[in-house]
């Protein structure tokens, strides 16, 4: 079965394309951009999707997702995480290793890939752990995980505190040319903090996590990347100083890339005001100057990509005192409308937002996705950037509903998500 996407505005930053035309999908790949749709409309073997007035772009790529399986299936499974991705316009997701067991060896990697192939609607690429059990002590079986399909390594959530171990990891990954992905946080400095350290934490009587706990590790990791020549990717940047450090490192040629989440460029720690545990994540929501610095970083290219850090937790786990709730919010189904706000606010152009959700993240992990090049797998999203949407957590496809954006009125509706030439979501 072929698909013809008719009359949409095709935006593909990977080829610098921005024009109204048709897209023909055949045998799961992008076949051509035919000038006329007439021939295909008469062909009963071709499904015609009318995309007039809509944007047609490469499917989104999220390089920071927690799928929770194996081990935490009450929060999310590979199936429900993929459903959530498809509903959010993501055709490719990259999953973090903090499962149970941790993805620190090839058998867990193979399990995830098998499950994703048999139950998942979208492309899944796993990240392996840096250290065994994410304990920060000795290196995990990185070579074997790479052979099995891991596209990077990270001890996300459990940062490697020992700088020598980090050096060994960076030296080792160079053989495979995959990045070390750093959740940059000095756990000692964070202590038992639960939100950003500042005026708000004092007022609310909650223990704070200072920006410095991120900044010192961003600085250390940049230094180690400089020493080893490895590719360092920094997760969910949240502070002004981190943005400054990454900007300076890039300027002197360090191989560093970085991501920012929609929540860190949209919210500040004021969102914690009502002790809403859905505003609790790590790194925490920061102050106004930090949020503005993240936006500036996105604008000048210091922050290469938008990634969600989709971190599902069950209602029971989140419905507790702020101190006791786990860190994390879901993000796959709110990413597009929150990112489009950047266009409305004239921070980025629509093409730039699409690039930060498609070819840029794909390039960081060499995924060969995020493009509508002829012959590429037909991973496509069709969306209406002007359509008003009201975020309703009850409609989420994710198993978890932990979002601080419930009830928000935004713009940007996903109409179709197509993976390898198959419609996996339609509104
Ligand atoms: O908020 C977060 N949640 N930050 C992390 O680093 C981990 C994640 C999770 O696994 O829930």
Image: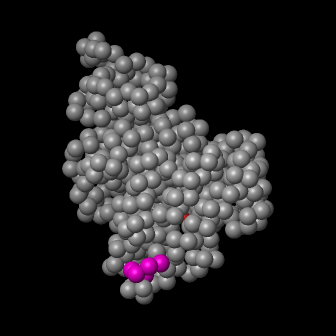
Residue 130 spot, x, y in % from top left:
70, 57
Location of residue 6 with respect to 355 vertically, above or below: above
| Residue 7 in the image, given as x and y percentages of width and height | 26, 25
Vertical relation: 262 (above or below) 17: below
User: Looking at the image, which residue is at 40% across and 66% down?
Assistant: 289
Residue occupying image coordinates x 40% and y 70%: 287
Q: Is residue 214 visible?
A: yes
Q: Which residue is at the front of the view, 22 or 10?
A: 10
Residue 154 screen position, x and y as percent: 64, 56
Q: Quadrant of the N terminus?
A: top left
35 above or below 286?
above
- The magenta stretch spans residue 366: no
Indicate yes or no whether the magenta region holds residue 198: yes
For residue 221, what is the image quadrant? bottom right
* Image position of 406 (left or right of 60): left
Q: Which residues are magenta?
A: 197-201
Q: Residue at x 30, y 15 (%)?
A: 35
Q: In the visual, does 54 lie left or right of 293?
A: left
What x and y, as percent, mark residue 382?
32, 36
Nearer to us in this view, 192 or 78: 192
Residue drawn where x is 68% and y is 64% of the image? 160
């Amino acid at each position: 079965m072929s698909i013809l996407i008719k009359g949409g505005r095709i935006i593909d930053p990977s080829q610098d394309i921005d024009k109204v035309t048709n897209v023909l999908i055949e045998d799961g790949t992008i076949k051509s951009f035919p000038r006329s749709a007439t021939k295909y409309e008469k062909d009963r073997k071709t499904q015609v999707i009318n995309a007039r007035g809509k944007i047609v772009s490469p499917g989104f790529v999220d390089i920071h997702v927690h799928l929770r399986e194996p081990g935490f299936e009450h929060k999310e499974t590979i199936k429900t995480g993929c459903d959530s991705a498809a509903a959010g316009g993501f055709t490719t997701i990259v999953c973090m290793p903090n499962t149970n067991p941790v993805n620190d060896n090839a058998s867990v990697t193979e399990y995830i890939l098998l499950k994703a192939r048999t139950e998942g609607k979208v492309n899944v690429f796993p990240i392996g752990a840096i250290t065994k059990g994410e304990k920060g002590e000795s290196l995990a079986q990185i070579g074997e995980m790479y052979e099995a399909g891991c596209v990077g390594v990270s001890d996300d959530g459990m940062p490697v505190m020992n700088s020598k171990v980090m050096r060994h990891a960076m030296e080792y990954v160079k053989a495979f040319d995959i990045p070390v992905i750093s959740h940059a946080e000095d756990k000692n400095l964070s202590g038992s903090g639960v939100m950003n350290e500042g005026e708000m934490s004092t007022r609310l009587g909650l223990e704070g996590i200072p920006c410095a706990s991120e900044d010192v590790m961003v600085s250390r990791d940049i230094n180690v990347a400089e020493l080893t020549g490895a590719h360092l990717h920094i997760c969910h940047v949240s502070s002004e100083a981190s943005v400054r450090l990454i900007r300076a490192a890039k300027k002197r040629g360090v191989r560093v890339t970085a991501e920012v989440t929609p929540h860190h460029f949209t919210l500040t720690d004021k969102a914690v005001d009502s002790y809403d545990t859905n505003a609790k994540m790590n790194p925490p929501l920061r102050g106004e100057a930090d949020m503005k610095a993240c936006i500036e970083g996105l604008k000048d290219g210091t922050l290469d990509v938008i990634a969600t850090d989709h971190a599902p937790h069950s209602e029971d786990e989140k419905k507790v005192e702020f101190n006791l709730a786990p860190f994390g919010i879901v993000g796959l189904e709110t990413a597009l409308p929150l990112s489009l706000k950047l266009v409305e606010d004239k921070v980025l152009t629509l093409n730039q937002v699409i690039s930060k959700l498609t070819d840029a993240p794909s390039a960081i992990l060499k995924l060969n996705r995020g493009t509508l090049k002829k012959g590429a797998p037909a991973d496509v999203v069709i969306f209406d950037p002007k359509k008003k949407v009201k975020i309703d957590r009850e409609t989420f496809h994710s198993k978890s509903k932990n979002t601080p954006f419930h009830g928000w009125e935004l713009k940007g509706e996903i109409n179709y998500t197509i993976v390898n030439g198959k419609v996996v979501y339609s509104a």
